[in-house]
Image (tube, rainbow, N blue to C red):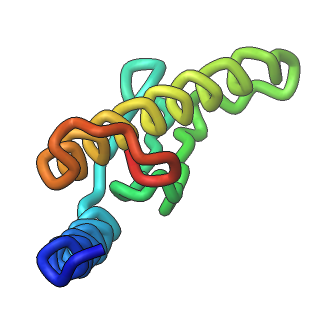
Amino acid sequence: MNLSMIKKARELKSNLDKAQKELKNITLEVTSGKGAVKVTINGQQKIQSIKISPMVMDPNKPEKLEKLVLEAVSDAIGKSQKLAAKNLGKLTGGFKIPGLT
């Protein structure tokens, strides 16, 4: 490896670290059931909170609430992954780096 490649690799790592920190501070809110379930997630796919309206808490129909929570969490993770891929893809030039994009 020559010095130029080492310098570029260090620069890329520095930029990726910065982007990861930025993603940690970005939050997305996703809802399901017309707002009955709200999931807040950051750009690193870490769920910050789940809010559930008492209106959908029916002890006789737990599967309805389970479905709404699953929908909201799945949608939140998908949107967070797309956001991270978009932000990190700019740095990696579109290369898929496992664990990053």
Which x, y percent locates residue 27? Answer: 29, 57
Q: Residue furthest right?
A: 60
Residue 63 percent coordinates (x, y): 80, 17
| Quarter of the figure with residue 96 | top left
Left or right, 71 with reference to 101: right
Q: Locate residue 44: give its quadrant.
A: bottom left
Q: Nearer the viewer, residue 69 or 54?
A: 69
State left or right for residue 15 relative to residue 54: left
Q: Quadrant of residue 42?
A: bottom left
Taking depth in this image into account, of 38 and 70 the one nearest to the observer is: 70
How many numbered badges does the structure rendering display?
0
Is residue 89 among the parts visible in the rendering? Answer: yes
Left or right placement of residue 91 versus residue 36 in this view: left
- Residue 25 seen in the figure: no
Q: Report the side of 43 relative to 26 (left or right).
A: right
Q: Which residue is at a point 21% across and 43% down the rendered structure image?
A: 89
Quarter of the picture holding the C terminus: top left
Which residue is pictured at 21% across the width and 69% down the height?
12
Q: Is residue 34 above or below residue 6?
A: above
Residue 37, compared with residue 99, is above or below; it is above
Q: Quick check: 61 above or below 6?
A: above
Seen at 22% across and 77% down, the residue is 2
On the image, the x and y values in percent for residue 3 come to 18, 83
Q: Which residue sits furthest front?
A: 2
The residue lying toward the viewer, choosing from 63 and 99, is 99
- From the image, which quarter does the N terminus lie in? bottom left
Residue drawn at x 70%, y 32% as measured from the top left: 57
Q: Position of residue 90 (x, y in %)?
A: 12, 47
